[in-house]
Image (cartoon, rainbow, N blue to C red):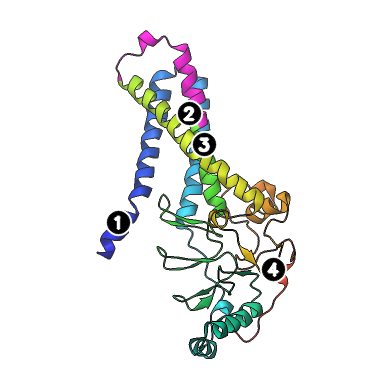
Amino acid sequence: MCFTAGCIDWLPVVGGWLVKAWSYYAYVIVFCGSVVKDDAVRLAFIVGFHVLMALLLWSELTTIATPPPNVPAYFSLSEVDLRLLQEARTEEARKGFLEVLGQQRGVLTRGLDGAVSYCEVCERIKPDRAHHCSVCRRCVLKMDHHCPWFNNCVCFSTYKAFLLTNMYVILLCTYTLFTAGSYFHQVPWNHWRITEPAVQVSTMVIVSVAFFFSVGPFFFFHLTLVAFNRTTLESLRRPQFVDKGDTFDIGFHNNVVEVLGHSWLLWLFPVHTSLGDGSRFPTKLHPHNRDRFHVRGI
């Protein structure tokens, strides 16, 4: 049963790979091989397609293969703390004890009930922006959402690669539309008989348009999240901070650097350059929160 469920989880990923394999055949073999007659133009088209496809696959495979990072050990409870929490007789006593544990670990946000967020499954204090993923069965740092198209959590360790995957999908679709579309404009329609090149190229253009208008708005939504330093979950429910007026939004430039890193030369490549370890983040009122706490004996 578990094996069957695991195979089902991979179906969207395999489906995406099949679409990319077909698009490679339709563009490189059929369009460039049969439709484009000029050798120099054909070479330029093929090189451009391969560069974008390589960057797309690199970004996608990085998103798929990178596991969510482990929550630092100091967020876990010792046997003594766990026993004291379980022995709390009232909800207020439990909240009070969690507050002490949260402050020791530098947690700045609270749950809807005003208490420090605690994961009953993992038996640990949840770091800011962390959530328990029921699919991954673990607490995930800076969780955005669990994405079936990657069979992985989009989170602190994968968010940059996830963004780049979406960006390169859009760029590849745009490239395909402009290059293949130019031949639609040049070739008289009565020459486009029901042949393999006509069917393949027409279908490729339709699929490119469909992906552009489906992935495009999603990508630009995530760009706004980066600009304001939010996750998808935080856009649905804003974090509740201990200090009124606090926020993870630390200015456009700093927000972008948090995700993409300091070196703009690496922004377009799916290498991990996000700042920190995903358990603590600077905020408007606590700009040095990452280095603010040093927990001993936990």
| First reached walking from the N terminus: tag 3 or tag 2 | 3
State yes or no: discs 3 and 1 in contact (Cβ < 8 Å).
Answer: no
The residue wearing badge 4 is: 290
> Reading the chain from its start, which is encountered first: label 2 or label 4?
2
Chain-order first, disc 1 or disc 2:
1
Q: Amino acid at mark 2?
A: Thr
Q: Which residue is mark 2?
A: 176
Q: Residue at x 72, y 54 (%)?
A: 254
Instruction: Residue 50: give x, y in percent of width and height.
Output: 49, 35
Give the residue pinned by disc 1.
7
Tell me the element at label 1: helix
**209 up-or-down from 15: above or below:** above
In three-dimensional space, the C-alpha distance between marks 2 and 4, rounded to whole angstroms, equals 44 Å
Is the residue under label 2 in contact with that under label 1 (CB below 8 Å)?
A: no
Query: Label 3 sits on what residue type?
Result: Ile
Using a 10 Å C-alpha cutoff, classify the residue at mark 2 as few (fewer than 14 neighbours), some (14 to 19) or many (20 or more): many
Q: Nearer the viewer, mark 3 or mark 2?
A: 3
Q: Is residue 282 in sight in this rendering?
A: yes
For the point 51% across and 24% down, the residue is 178
Residue indicated by mark 3: 170
Q: Which residues are magenta?
A: 174-195
